[in-house]
Image (cartoon, coloured by chain):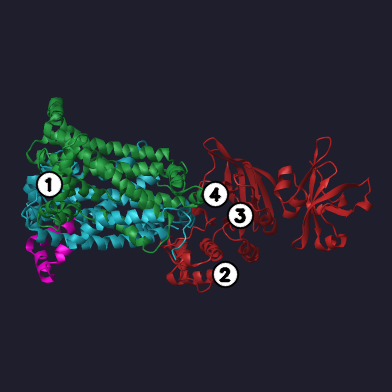
Amino acid sequence: MALRPSTTESPLVRRILISTALLVLSLFLLLPLTAVFAEALRRGWEVFLASLHDEVALSAIHLTLMAAAISVPLNTLFGVSAAWLITKYRFKGRAFLLSLIDLPFAVSPVIAGLVWVMIFGSKGWLPPTAMAEALAPAARLIASLAEYDGFGWLLADLAAWLADPKIVFAFPGIVIATVFVTFPFVARELIPLMESQGSDQEEAAVTLGARGWQIFLRVTLPNIKWGLFYGVLLCNARAMGEFGAVSVVSGHIRGETNTLPLHIEVLYNEYQFSAAFACATLLAFLAIVTLGMKSLVEHLSGHQSSGHK
Amino acid sequence: MSISIKSINKTFGNYAALENISLEVPNGSLTALLGPSGSGKTTLLRIVAGLEFSDPGEGRILFHGEDVSETPAGKRGVGFVFQHYALFRHMTIAENIAFGLSVLPRSLRPAKAEIHARISELLKLVKLEGLDKRRPHELSGGQRQRVALARALAIQPKVLLLDEPFGALDAQVRKSLRRWLRVFHDEIGLTTLFVTHDQEEALELADQVVVMRNARIEQVGKPQEIYDHPRSPFVYEFLGNVNKLSASNGSHRYIRPHEIEIAFAAEYNPETDRLAKIDHLFSAGPVATLSVRLDDGQFLEVEISRKQLDELALDPGDEVSIRIMDSSKSGV
Amino acid sequence: MAKRRVIPGFGLSMGFSITYLSLIILIPLAALFIKAAGLGWAEWWNLLTTPRVIAATKLTFGASAAAASVSMVMGLLVTWVLVRYDFPGRRLLDAMVDLPFALPTAVAGITLTQIYAPNGWIGQYISQCASWIQTNYQPGGWLGGQVEDLAAKGAAYSPIGVFIALTFIGFPFVVRTLQPVMEDLGAEIEEAAATLGANRWIVFRRVILPLLVPALITGFTLAFARAIGEYGSVIFISGNLPMKTEILPLLIVAQLEQFKYEAAAVIASAMLLVSFALLFLINLLQRRLDWQHR
C-alpha cells in the first residue's frame, strides 16, 4: 500500500471529487459557451457572416465601441484617483467612501438606467424641453461658429444636439448608464493591490525630491500596471456587454440607439436565432479574451490566484 | 519509549532533504535536532510523526522496537507541537485540548466527565487554569504555546515532538518558557524530540544534541561534549562565537573569544604570546568584548570580564599582549 | 489647520473622486429616492404591495436564495478541487470559473434559454424525464404542476429557469470568496488534527468547514445580492408572465414602458434599500473575514 500524507484524501475520493467538479463545470459553463458558437453556425458560415455584415449590426457594433471608448477612460481616471486617495491617505469618512465606490455593484442594472430616466426623461428633473431652453443661447452661438470653416462638421453636430438636447433615449444616455455600471471596476482592482504594496516607495520618492506626477508615473504606475491593465480590461468587457441599464435608457431605436447586446435581444425576440447568436459570438469572444488576459496577467505579475505553491 | 531512526532517506523532486539518517533517541530523554534552516531537521521530525514518509526502501522508524513506519500519523500516538501552534481558532481552549479525545471512536472515547477532568488536569499542568473558555486569539504567544502542548499531551502520546517550540516567541518569554519546559520534561519524563536552529537553546535544554547540516547528521552527543569537542569546523562555528585564525602554512585554528587571555604589552612573551592592537571595545554588560588586530592583520574577538577590563583600563588603540589558553581545542 | 500629508495629491484626488462620485452615483440615486419619497408613505406602500409586485418579490427573493444556496454547495466543491488537487486542465478550469462574470448577460440569457428549452441540449432530457414521471406516477398537487411544466417547457420559461440563470450568475462569487481563504488555511492545522487521531472526514467537518463558514456566508450574500438585481440573463429564460415568472427588475422595466414612472421609482427605491442593507452586511462580513485572516 502506498503511504499517503494525512492531509490528502484517498485517490478514490479525490478522483470522484475532481470528476464531479469537472462534470458540473462543463455542464454549467462549458456547455453554454459551446452553445453560443454552435447556434451561431447552425445555418452555416454564410448566414453567420451575413448577420455580422448587416448594416444594423454594424451600427450596433459601432455604437458599442463608441460607448466603451468614452466610459472606460473616464472610469479609469476615477479608479486611479480613488485608489490613490483611499490607499495613500487616512482621513475621516474613508471607510464610507470605500463603500460608496462599491455601491454600483449592489445596484440592479435596471435601476442604474432608471435613475437617468428620472433625471433626464420627459417627466424628470431636467426634461429635454427645459434643457433645450437653457441651452438655446449656447446652441445659437455654436451654430454661428459652425458656419466658419475648420471644425465645422463637429460644431454643426454639436449645435444640432444642443438645439434638441436629448440624453435619455439617445447616445449620451447610453454612455452615462454605462459609466454608472462600470464605475467601480478599475478602483476595485487597484485598491487592494495598492493597499498591499503600502506607501514606503512613494515616501522614499518624496524624500528623494520627486514631485507628485513623477512619483505616480515613475514609482506607483510601474508597480500597479498589471492590476490597472486587468481592471481596464474588466471595465471594458462590462461596458461592451452591458444590457439592463442600457436597455432602459436607449429607447431601442434600431440602427440608432441599439448597442450590440440590445441588437441581440431584438434579433432573438424576432426568432432570428442564428443572427442573434452570430452577434453573441462577438461578445462571447470578448469574454474569452478577457479571461485569457486575466490568466496571462496573473502569470506575468507572478501573482497566482490559486493552486499549490 | 525510545525512538529508533534507521537509514532514512527523503528526497523532494531532485532535492535530497535527508540522506541515510540513523539516530537513537533514548527513553525519557530530551533530544534536540539542531541545525541551520534547510538542514533537514524539520523533515526528520515530520517523518517521525508520520506527517511525511521516507523514500521507499530501507528506512524505518521504531518506537520502542515496534516498527511504526507504515502507521499513519493519527495512530502513531505522537504528540506534535507545531511551530505556529496550529490551534483551532474556532474552538475554545477546552475544545482544543479535548479534540484528540473527542475524535476517538465511540467505544474508546472517555465519558464527558472524564474528558472534563482531563482538561482541568492538563490546564493545571501547563499553568493555564481558568482559561478554558477563552479562544486562541485572546491568549499571548507563550500561553498559546502551552495550550498546543496540553492539546498534544491530552492523547497521552508515547513521544512528544516539538517543531521550533520557541521560534515564534519574543526573547524574554522564550527564555522563561525554555526553563519551564526543562522542568516540565523532568516531571513527566516523556521521550521528547525537538527541532531548533538556536544553539543556545539546544545546549541549555537538551540531554542529547543532534547537529544536522545539509541533510546529514554532523555530530551527536551531550551538550558539553559537543561544545568542547566539536568534530568539524561547521559544528565549531555553529555552536557559538568563534575566531578562525589562519596560520602561515594555510591551516586554520578555532578559538572561542573567552579562551583568549589579555595583558599589557609590557608582559609580552614571544614564546607564547602575540602582540595586538585594540580596534574596538564594547563594554556594556557583564562581559566586555574587544576586537583586536594581530600583527599580521587578522582580527580576533576577545571576551574578558568587566572587572578585568576595569583593572587593565584599556582604550582603543592600545597595544596589548594576548595569549591563547591551553584549554582551547585547536583543531582542524 | 489642515493636516500635513507627506505624499502629494490629496486635494486633487479627493476633489476629483468626490465630484465624479457625486455626479455619477450619488445625485442620480438621490433623484430616484426623491421621486419615490414625493409620493408620500401611504402611496409608496400602496404601490409596493400590489399583488403583481408581491408575486415578483416572492419569485425574485425565493429564486435568488435558492440559487445562492446551490451556488454555495457547487462553489465549495469546485473551490476544493481547484485549491487542493493538481490535475491536467486545472488552470483552464480556474479561468473558466469567471465566465459568468465576463460573459455579457444578454448572451448568457439567450444561451441558457436555448440549452434548457424543451428541444435544447439539456432541456430535452429534462422534458423527457418529466413526461416519463408524469405517465408512470401521475403526481398531483403542486408537484404535479411542476412536473407538467417541466414536461412541456423543459427547464425554461418557468421559475426553475429563473433559478438556473441566477445560479449561473452567482456561482463565481462563492468560488472567488472561498478560494483565498481555503488557500490560506495552511497544512499545519490539518496536520495537528491528524496527529490527534482525527480521520479525513472529521478533519473536514470539525476543523476545515467551521473555518470556511464566514467565507461561505459572504459568498452566499454576494451571490444573493447580485441575483436580486439580475436582469439580462433572466428575462429570456423566465418567460416573463406577470404574477408567474416576472422578476422585480423586469417589473420595473414593464412599468417604465407604460410610463408609470412612480410605480417604477417605488419598486426601485425598495430594491435599493434592500441592496444597501445587503452591502452593509457584506461589508461587515468582509471585515470579519479580514480579521479572521490575520
Circles 2 and 3, Cβ within 8 Å, touching? The answer is no
Disc 1 marks a residue whose amino acid type is Ala
> In the image, is B236 to the left or to the right of A148?
right
**Looking at the image, residue B188 lies above or below residue C187:** below
In the image, residue C44 lies in the stretch drawn in magenta: yes
Q: Please give the label number shown on residue A283.
A: none
The chain coloured red is: B
The chain coloured green is: A
Q: Please name the residue that numbered disc 2 is placed on.
A: B125
Q: Which residues are magenta?
A: C34-63
The disc, 2 or 3, on the residue closer to the chain's N-terminal end is 2
Are there few (<14), some (14-19), or many (20+) residues within 10 Å of tag 2? some
Disc 1 to disc 3, how far (Cα)?
A: 85 Å
Disc 2 to disc 4, how far (Cα)?
A: 26 Å
Q: Please name the residue that numbered disc 3 is placed on.
A: B194
Colour in which chain C is drawn? cyan
Please report, as a chain letter, where disc 3 is located: B
Determine if marks 3 and 4 fall on one subunit. yes
Quadrant showing the C terminus of chain C: bottom left
Residue in the picture at 65% in, 63% down: B175
Disc 3 to disc 4, how far (Cα)?
A: 11 Å
Give the percent coordinates (x, y) of residue B183: 65, 66
